[in-house]
Image: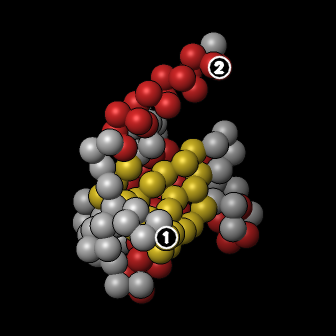
Amino acid sequence: MANQKIFRRTRIKQRVRKVISGTPERPRLSVFRSNRDIYVQIIDDLSGRTLVSASSAIAEIRDQKITKVAKSALVGKNVAEKATAAGITQVVFDRNGYLYHGRVKSLADAAREGGLMF
């Protein structure tokens, strides 16, 4: 069962990534979701650099006793703050093969509220 899930997500990821690419003007916001934490990066694919990153593993977010969906929202706000400080306002959202609900949706909504446009 686990191999089927990984295979399915990999196929979806490849299908999406052949269309979505980050540019210096509009970098890619990539989400990785593990069982415990959620990680997000803003990536310029042309130069291969990560411009901004955030995760729920940092001490301020990790130590709070809240749900994983609420932690995802805090990560979304955190990455939006870092991105606006770096001068990034528009991004392309890459859900990385995950379904757009739950933690991924919470992160995306919080990033939009924080000032990112996608």
Circle number at residue 49: 1
Residue drawn at 69 percent across, 67 percent down = 58
Residue drawn at 49 percent across, 45 percent down = 103
Q: Position of residue 80 (x, y in %)?
A: 41, 72
Q: Is residue 44 left or right of residue 70?
A: left
SS at mark 2 in the image: helix
Q: Neighbour class for label 1 at 10 Å: few (<14), some, many (≥20)?
A: few
Q: Neighbour class for label 2 at 10 Å: few (<14), some, many (≥20)?
A: few
The quadrant where residue 93 appears: bottom left
CB within 8 Å, label 2 to label 1: no
The quadrant where residue 115 appears: bottom left
Residue kind at label 1, given as amino acid type: Arg
Q: Position of residue 45 (x, y in %)?
A: 40, 62
Viewer-side residue, 42 vs 17: 17
Q: Position of residue 108 (x, y in %)?
A: 38, 54
Circle number at residue 68: none
Q: Is residue 112 above or below residue 83?
A: above
Going from N to C along the chain, the mark reached first, 2 or 1, is: 2
Residue drawn at 36 percent across, 71 percent down = 114
Residue indicated by mark 2: 2
Viewer-side residue, 101 vs 85: 85
